[in-house]
Structure formats: C-alpha cells, structure tokens
Amino acid sequence: MDRSRTMPRLCFVLTALLTLASSALRSVCMLTQFDETVGYFNPGPLPTLSNVLYFIAVAVAIAGALLIPKGSLPVTLDTRLRLPAAFLWGASLAAFTVAALLFCYKDRTHDAILAPILVGLPASLFFFISADRSGLYPDWLSLAGFVPVLWCFCGIWETYADQYTTMNSPIKISLQMGLIGLALILVSELRFRLGKALPRGAVAFMGTGSFLALNGSVPILLGTGAHILDNTLHLFYAIVLLCGGLYGLYTLFQFTWFPSEREETEDGPESDTPDVEDDGQTRPDGPDSPNAV
C-alpha cells in the first residue's frame, strides 16, 4: 500500500464523512432538541454526542495529517477548476454585505456590526479577482487574500458583541467556530499561493476548517427554514459559512486526489534530468574513447 497516496485521500474521505454525520446529527438536534424560549439544546445524548463530534473531527484531521509520510505531499496547489467554488464564496460575501446593511444594521444596538459590513465587499473582490487563477499569486493578490481572513475576525467580534444572543449560546459558539474554520481554510491556501506551503498542515487545517464551517451553517439554515430560529444576521452568516465550507472541501479534495502533474514535494522538486538508457553505443568518455587512459 502506498501511504503517500492513500493517506491524503483517506483524510479527505474521513473529513467528508464526519462533516456529513455531524451536520446531520446537529440538524436533528436543532429540529427536535432546541428550546426556543431559552435558546439552548435540551440536555440529552444527541446534543452531547454532537458536541463530542467536534473534538473527534479535529483529532482525526490532525492525526490523519501526521500519518501522511513527510515529504510526500506537493508544495504546489493546482486549482484549475476553482472558478465556481471561488465565485460562490465571493458572491455570498457580497450578498452578506448588502443584506446585512439593508436588513440588520438599523436593528443593532452595537457598532461592531459595521466591521463585517465594511470589510465584506473588499473581501468578496479577492475571490472574484482570483477565481480563475491557480498556482502562485503575485504579492499584491496574496496580500489581498488576508482581507477575507480579516472579515472572519470581524464576524467573530460582532457575534461576541451581540447583546441579543447569550454569550454561551450554542448558536453563537457554532458561528464563531465556523468563522475560525473559514480563517483556517484561507490561511492554509494562502501559504501555497505565497510559496510557503505547509502541506500536511494544510490537510489538517482545511479538514478542520471545512468541518467547523459546514457544521456551523447547515443546522442554522435548517432551523431558520423550520422557523425555530429567527435571527436574520445569523442566517446571513450561515450562508457564507456554507459557501466557504464547500470551498474548503473542494480545495482539500483537489489537493489530496489530484495533485499537480509535476509534483514538487517538501524534499524539493523532482529532477529535471532525463534518464539515459544504455543503447549499446560507445560513449565519448567510455573505455574505447581515444582520450581514455
């Protein structure tokens, strides 16, 4: 068994399965165990198992990445089919900016909501500009890639300052964890774009980030659709988390299943010197050469 090929793919499969299982379980908890009057899940085995899956998913992502043989992963990220996924994330950020300004800003008592609104549009532009690019980015575009990371932290600050949702609410915590997940996905990819890749770390961080983002978005979207939740801004955050989580899964899938054709690993690029076959002819420096001693 070639662990250098099978382990990265196994990491993606485990991430996808855990994300699917946890999102489904937490959605069931949202639809059946959430107490709307207090804003918490009712105590029980399902909410407890849902919380435990957070720790299991992170542990699996890290352990799986460490089991990948060192030096076997490429240090280049080939995302030639990135355009739909990047455009989707960029469009969700642009839509968040407009929708939050129109429907949420006037109802908020704190100014922290201005931060994600103001940063949202510049953050979306990064994805629109880079949607059809692959490989290394120019320095200015790599720098622009940190604007969406800033948006994630603005969102964390805004949800922390939200006075309408209790501090330890599972909704607030899942949104904040999801935003941290988006930041992990972005930073992992930007290291490739800057030529400072951390391949095994990228597998762990993208897997963790995708899990956190999707696990924080799907239950909120379903809960809002079922009229269990009614916070409009949380709905807008969940849409961005959904698009960012799908982007992270796509990037992880592309990296683990379809690495670059000319792989450059952590141990350095493959040799460009072609193998020379012995055709039976006398070489200039061979024993029959006139220059031989």
Image (spheres, rainbow, N blue to C red):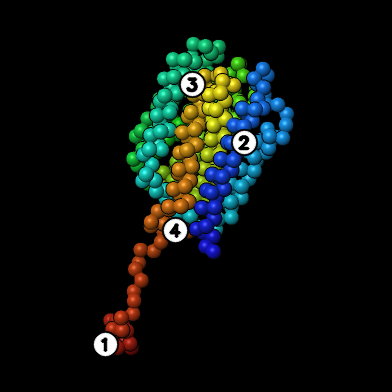
Sequence-wise first label, 4 or 2: 2
Quickly name the residue at label 2: 25
Quickly name the residue at label 3: 115
C-alpha gap between disc 3 and disc 1 = 79 Å
Sequence-wise first label, 3 or 2: 2
C-alpha gap between disc 2 and disc 1 = 80 Å
Question: Looking at the image, is mark 3 or mark 2 nearer the viewer?
Answer: 2
Q: Please name the amino acid that badge 3 sits on.
A: Ala
Determine crowd level at label 3: few under 14, some 14-19, many 20+ residues with C-alpha closer than 10 A: some
Q: Please name the amino acid that badge 4 sits on.
A: Gly
Q: Please name the amino acid that badge 2 sits on.
A: Leu
52 or 277: which is nearer to us?
A: 52
Sequence-wise first label, 4 or 3: 3
Q: Which mark is residue 268?
A: 4
Q: Are marks 4 and 1 in contact (CB under 8 Å)?
A: no
**Rendered location of residue 288, percent (x, y):** 29, 88
